[in-house]
Amino acid sequence: MADHYDALETRDPAERETSLFAQLPEILRQAIRSPAYAERLRGIDPAAVTSREALATLPLLRKAELPILQKAALPFGGFVAEAPGSFGRLFTSPGPIFEPESATSNPWRSARGLFAAGFRKGDVVLNTFSYHLTPGGFILDSGARALGCAVIPAGPGNTEQQFELIEAYRPAAYCGTPDFLKILLDGAAAAGRDVSSIRRALVSGAAFPKSLQEEFSAKGIEAYQAYATADLGFVAYETSAREGLVVNEDIIVEIVRPGTGDPVPEGEVGEIVVTTLDPHHPIIRLALGDLTAVLPGRSPCGRTNMRIRGWMGRADQATKVKGMFVRPEQVAEIGRRHPELSRLRLVVTREGETDVMTLNAETAAPSDDLAAAVAATLQGVAKLKGAVALVPPGTIPNDGKVIADERKYD
């Protein structure tokens, strides 16, 4: 049995990087055919964007902005040049956010992740992700069928009917949330139903702790997780190495400091930003609002692409202090104005019945003058007074948290 989906997964990282950025200028040219990207990328020469450094100068498109942008210019906010009828399927996700599916095989790039989880041609797959209006079910369905699997489009819920399907079709593999797989297994045990045919699983959409992975393994099911979104499909997927998630081919992933579009050093926690290389539906620097970090080195499974640690929380940490919102972008602006500072964290607490802000800032050269200058900048940027605590480098945890709301209310 082949260990890898294709030779792209094991190519030299420099070769991959060269290939990705050789394609990017044409993708940008396709993107600016749409009115929204034409405006956002005004003045950008696509031919000059051939490196990560050049890509990082382009503006972010925040996923959190999409519902408002799309409502103003239905259905896709002006970010899609092609007519809706040129796509294979059209979806909506909570927000609402409207998403098109390209009319191609494996449009969500999920086949690679399913292959890494052990799915193979001829397998019968029970797919319990929803097929109703949202792309979730189709993301896995299209990848499984691209591999040559037969798919049971079960959707979520209705466990009694799921048991009937499993006993009739004897699926070897499962797609869905880890929570629902546990419900099926526990329900089958209680009802005396036979679900023993399931031996492989690809799970997503919910936390998958090691304890649950081990529980499935004890029942004879090897389950792997994927990081996917309704906008992009598969971004990264777990492999037999069980060391982080390998980034998918044909996309560019950046990890940036929350509140900015600036890439962070390898290993530092930041926000996931994705650029796709689909000329029919290009997506340029979509900031997903999720946190992760890059793992150093290559995967023992032989795949050579970037690895990420998986989902590590949310980057959107805006909070309200004394009736006013304070946002990660504002904390980032303080750092830009004081380059002698490294990692920053704004901590919000309560003293008596009053909100209190303290900006913890790492620096190798603390001084009273610096603390006073940073406090003045904090007040100028946030329009609120706050204390400043200068701390040694390495003091603030590397968890991507820029604003920590530690208020407790009795």
Image (cartoon, rainbow, N blue to C red):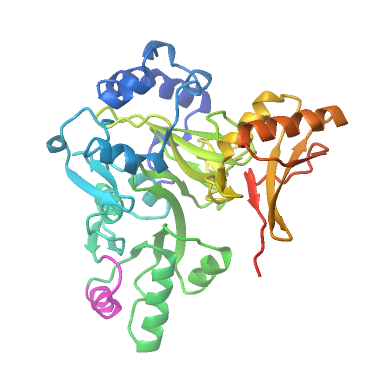
Task: Provide residue 71's location: percent of width, then percent of height.
Answer: 27, 41
Q: Residue at x 69, y 60 (%)?
A: 353
Task: Provide residue 402's location: percent of width, then percent of height.
Answer: 63, 43
Q: Residue at x 30, y 64 (%)?
A: 128
Residue 162 falls within the magenta-colored stretch: yes
Q: Is residue 187 above or below residue 394?
A: below
Looking at the picture, tell me which residue is in the foreground, 106 or 170.
106
Q: Is residue 230 at least partly visible in the picture? A: yes
Report the side of 297 relative to 184 (left or right).
Answer: right
**Residue at the farthest bottom position:** 191
Task: Provide residue 93's location: percent of width, then percent of height.
Answer: 30, 51
Q: Residue at x 42, y 58 (%)?
A: 205
Region of the chain picked out in magenta, as a range: 155-168
User: How many numbered circles does the render carry?
Assistant: 0
Q: Is residue 1 at least partly visible in the picture? A: no
Residue 45 falls within the magenta-colored stretch: no
Report the side of 51 relative to 180 (left or right).
Answer: right
Looking at the picture, tell me which residue is in the foreground, 193 or 352.
352
Task: Provide residue 188's location: percent of width, then percent of height.
Answer: 36, 82
Chief secondary structure of the magenta span? helix
Looking at the picture, tell me which residue is in the foreground, 109 or 367.
367
Report the side of 41 relative to 146 (left or right).
Answer: right
Q: Is residue 178 above or below residue 307?
A: below
Q: Looking at the rendering, in which quadrant would you find the C terminus?
A: bottom right
Residue 66 image-quadrant placement: top left
